[in-house]
Image (cartoon, grey):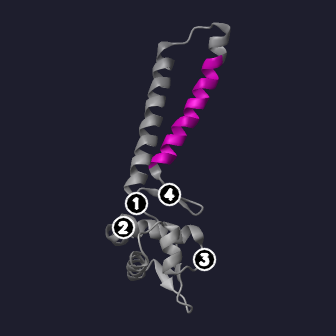
Amino acid sequence: MEQEEKELNASTFQSYLYLVKVGKPVGPRDLMRGANLSSPSVAYRNLQKLIDLGLVVKDDYGNYVVKEKKNMKGFIWLGKTLIPSFAVFGFIFIGVLIGEIAVLVPHLLVGAPVQESFWLLTLVTVVSAMIFLFEALRFRKKGK
């Protein structure tokens, strides 16, 4: 898949994601509308590139369908949605943060002291979650 990743530009990548998401054969015009491409010729060019890379096949009716879902570097498939790996790590840190807050709240409600190291741990967790989620958004917007 490494060569396929190098040859996929943002438009072709979006076309591939749309084809996986829709999960049925589509024509160039359907792809153009679904992947928000500028023209049917761009859709057709993307489909040809995906065929050349072995990611898509053309059926007997002239429509195009994904041959198989391929793993992409830096992304994880969640059903028919491809999400950046950074997002997974960000949500793990949010889960840890929820656990830390669950420990903090009872202490704060009864006025029990909280160690400074726990506050530092909570701050590190917040910053880590924010960094990973920010990077996930940035990675997703780049289109790859």
Q: Which mark is on residue 24?
A: 3
Q: Position of residue 140 (x, y in %)?
A: 43, 53
Q: Residues within 10 Å of mark 4 (few under 14, many from 20)?
A: some
Query: Quadrant of the rendered structure where residue 113 is?
Result: top right
Q: Secondary structure at mark 3?
A: loop
Q: Which mark is on residue 5?
A: 2
At a point 36% along the width and 69% down the height, the residue shown is: 8
Of residues 53 and 115, the one nearer the viewer is: 53
Q: Secondary structure at mark 2?
A: helix
Q: Which residues are magenta?
A: 86-105
Q: Amino acid at mark 1?
A: Lys
Tell me the CA gap for discs 2 and 3: 23 Å
Q: Secondary structure at mark 1?
A: loop
Q: Residues within 10 Å of mark 2 (few under 14, many from 20)?
A: some
Quadrant of the image containing the N terminus: bottom left
Q: Is residue 16 left or right of residue 24?
A: left
Q: Are marks 4 and 3 in contact (CB under 8 Å)?
A: no
Sequence-wise, the earlier of marks 2 and 4 is 2
At a point 45% along the width and 77% down the height, the residue shown is: 55
Q: Are marks 2 and 3 in contact (CB under 8 Å)?
A: no
The correct choice, above or below, for 12 with respect to 116 in the image is: below
Q: Which mark is on residue 133?
A: none
